[in-house]
Image (tube, grey):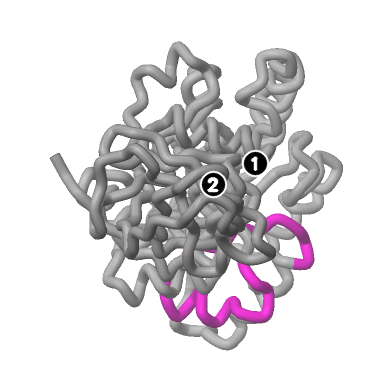
Amino acid sequence: MVKAYGYGLGPFGVSKLVENNAVDYLGVANILEGVELRKAGITLPIMIMKPELESFDLIIEYQLSPVIFSFHSFQALLKALKKYPTKLETYNINIKIDTGMHRLGFSPEEVPELIKQLKKHTNIKIESVFSHLAASDQPEHDEFTHFQIQLFEKLSGEIAQSTPYKFDKHILNSNGALRFTHAQYDMVRIGIGLYGFVSDPKDAKHIKNVAVLKTKIAQLKTIPKGDSVGYGRRGLAKKETLIATVPIGYADGISRRIGNGNWQVKLNGKFAPTIGSVCMDMLMIDVTGIDCKEDDEAFIFYDQASTKQLSELLQTIPYEILSSISPRVKRLFLSK
């Protein structure tokens, strides 16, 4: 899965990396993400998880694989295909079944009618049938997860019996692939696990961190006791204080909630608390007593633990921390 700007890491770099490492398929959220990957030279099959129904022409033009999740989306596809009566004698789609997530997908009651529609339109070929687990990372909901898998087995089996060819099945995300190995079927959709995070601590210790967020000190200045720092004068120097300004702010995906001492930036092996409010393009840190100079690197997060701690501080999950990083932040891919 390389949606959401490659979970914030940059879709082109991530896609090229996995393409070079024998991954079979990519998944993105919408057509624009898929088109951008094609324009960047990515040749792998690309699944569009939620295609914009008015833009199926682009899916066809850029050879993307749409997910069909409702009769409405199915009709939108048929309408688009009518424009290509000779060019597309067959067209591959992916079908999503709702087994309990209740987000997108054909309901169990709709599957018989879906089968009828597919038999009517023999130019449509199923590439895969899949569903999505609602709580694969939460053991307290394992009974429900097993129910979802069993329902998927039943419904995908009914579709399989109606088709003269074989298609792929998949239901597992990152945590599901680790915890429910019996349901790996033909494919698994690795998302957050690819970027260094899974829920089970036993598995997490085998997953390497892949991302750090760093910036550099733009300016150092010493301010006297009693002076204030930043907008609203919310930062206050309780003694003579050495302040470092780093060029990263909320327009880069840094939450304003980490300001005013709520987070510590790692700098030359030491930890410097934020001081004052986070600005649009900058934040200030208290580096009093830390040996540092302008252009030294400052890390907002630097390993799995710090990213998780930051997500807990912000009452969210690592997904949001990573995917919130603005596209204007430079991405640098390193290989070992």
User: Toward the viewer: 269 or 76?
Assistant: 269
Label annotation for residue 314: 1
Determine whether, in the image, residue 102 is placed left or right of residue 252.
Answer: right
The furthest residue to the right: 109
Q: Nearer the viewer, mark 1 or mark 2?
A: 1
User: Toward the viewer: 182 or 208?
Assistant: 208
Which contiguous range is marked in magenta?
51-72
Q: Residue at x 27, y 71 (%)?
A: 41
Q: Are marks 1 and 2 in contact (CB under 8 Å)?
A: yes
Mark 1 is on which residue type? Leu
Visible residue check, residue 92: no
Above or below, 169 against 46 in this view is above
Determine whether, in the image, residue 146 is placed left or right of residue 284.
Answer: right
Question: Residue 111: x percent and y percent?
Answer: 77, 45
Determine whether, in the image, residue 258 is placed left or right of residue 206.
Answer: right
Residue named by callout 2: 321
Quadrant of the frame with the C terminus:
top left
Q: Earlier in the sequence, mark 1 or mark 2?
A: 1
